[in-house]
Amino acid sequence: MTVKDQPFLPILLGSDMNAYGMARSFHEAYGIKPLILGRAKLTATENSKILHFRAIPRLNEQDVFLPAILKIASEFKGQKLLLLACGDDYAKLIITNKSKLTPHFAVPYIDQKLMERIVLKENFYNVCEEFNFAYPKTALCTYETKDTFTIDFNYPIIIKASNSVAYWNCSFPGKKKVFVAHDEAEKTAILTAIYQSTYKDNLTIQEFIPGDDSYMRVLNAYVGKDGKVKLMSLGNPILEEHSPEGIGSYAAIINTFDEALLDKVRYFLEEIGYIGFANFDMKLDMRDGQYKLFEINLRNGRSSYYVSASGHNLMKYVADDHIFNKPLELTYAKDKHLWLIIPKGVLFKYTQNDKLKKEAKQLIAQGKSTNSLFYKPDFNLTRWVKLMMNNLNYYRKYKKYFNNKGLS
C-alpha cells in the first residue's frame, strides 16, 4: 500500500521514541505507515519499515515550520491528513498556526488562548488553585532576580525551565533537563550556569517531594472533538531515566488505577474546554497522601505507548474521532501491563521499589510486557543491532548517572 492509497495519512512531527510509539500504534490499528517529519533521524525511527521519514532542518522554527507543513498539505491534497506533535515545540507551533492548518489537516489541539493559560508552569499552578489540585510549593526565578532570589521552603529543591522549548535550544556545561539543589551554594551555581547560556526565560523552583521514582504518576488522556474525555490511563513509573538529557523521562511504567483522580482530571479537562491529547506528570506525597501535580503537556507523553501496550490504542482514538467520525465512549484503562525501554537487567538492578519490582517480574512471566521500540513486524537486522547497542548503553548510563541530579 502506497502512502496515497492509505485511507488517511498521519503526519507526525518529531523523530524520537514518542514518534515511533505513535507510528507503531497507527500501524497496529490500521496497517498504515505515517509520514514522520523531523530535524534529523534518531535511533528510534531509523531503519523502520512502518513509517516514512523526511528530514527538514530547523522544522521547529516558525519561518521553516509553516511553509514546510503547507507544502506537505499541497503534496497530499485530496487525502485525509491528521497532524500530530510528538514534542512540546511542535505542539506549540501547531497551536500557534492552527487557523492556517485546519483547512488542510485534522488538527486535534486546543486554541492559543487556552495554551497561554496553561502552558507556562507558573500559569498552570494558578489553574491548579482554581480546580483544587495540590502541587509542590513553588517559586519563580527570573533573569532579573537571579542574584537576589531566595526561597521560603526547605531544601532539597527542584530547578527546571518554565519555557521547555527555549531551554531545549540552549546549551551549557553540566546541563540537565531537571536539577536538584541540596543547599544555597548548589542553587546559586545552577542558576548562574543556566543564565550564562542563551536561556533568559523564567525558572520554576519547587520543593522536592520525598520518594524515589516509583512515587511518580503519569496520566495520559484523550479528549474528543466534542469536548468530552474519551480515554484516561494512569501509569505508575517504576524507574526514570537518569542521564542529563533524560532526567524526568520514564524508563519503565506499570499501569495503575485511581478512579477519584481520573474523575477529578476529567472534570478539569472538560470544564476548561480542552480537546486532543493531554499528559500530566505528578508525584504521590506520602506526607499528606496527595498527588502533587507538576505540569500538563499539550500532547501525548513521550512514554504514552504504555497506554496502547495495555490494550487501549491511543492513536485509534484520535483517528476514529477526527478521521472516521466514530462515536467514542468514555474508558478508564485498568489493565495491568509493563512498558519499558530499558533492558530488564537495568530495571531490576536500579528499581528501588521491591513491590513494583516483583510485580514487573510477574507481568514479564505472564507475557504482559512491551518495549515499544522492538516491534516484530518492523524487524530487520540493521535496526535490531542499533537498538541492541542502544540497550547496552543503558547499563553504562545508569552506572554513571544514577541519582546524580546536580550540576556536576
Image: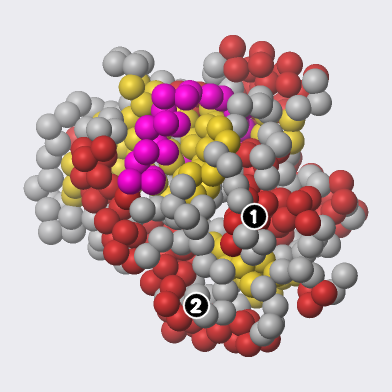
Q: Is residue 248 magenta?
A: yes
Q: Position of residue 309 (x, y in %)?
A: 70, 38
**How many numbered marks, from 0 up?**
2
Which residue type does callout 1 highlight? Answer: Lys
Magenta-tinted stretch: 245-271
Pick whichever of labels 1 and 2 is earlier in the sequence: 2
Q: Residue at x 78, y 50 (%)?
A: 28
Q: Disc 1, disc 2: CB below 8 Å?
A: no
Residue at image coords 56%, 32% = 332
Nearest the eye: 107 or 134: 107
Q: What percent of the width, then of the height, locates residue 59?
A: 53, 75
Q: List x then y, in percent, for residue 7.
A: 76, 68
Residue that carries the numbered disc 2 in the rendered image:
101
13 in relation to 172, above or below = below
Task: Give SS at disc 2.
Answer: helix
**Residue at image mark 1:** 326
Tell me what residue is drawn at x 26 percent, y 37 percent.
131
Locate residue 153, reporting x and y percent. Answer: 17, 29
Secondary structure beneath dot 1 equals: loop
In the displayed structure, 204 sits above or below 242; it is: below
Instruction: Give the side of residue 207 with respect to residue 393, left or right.
Output: left
Question: Relative to 20, does residue 403 appear above or below in the rendering?
Answer: above
- In-front residue for pair 154/319: 319
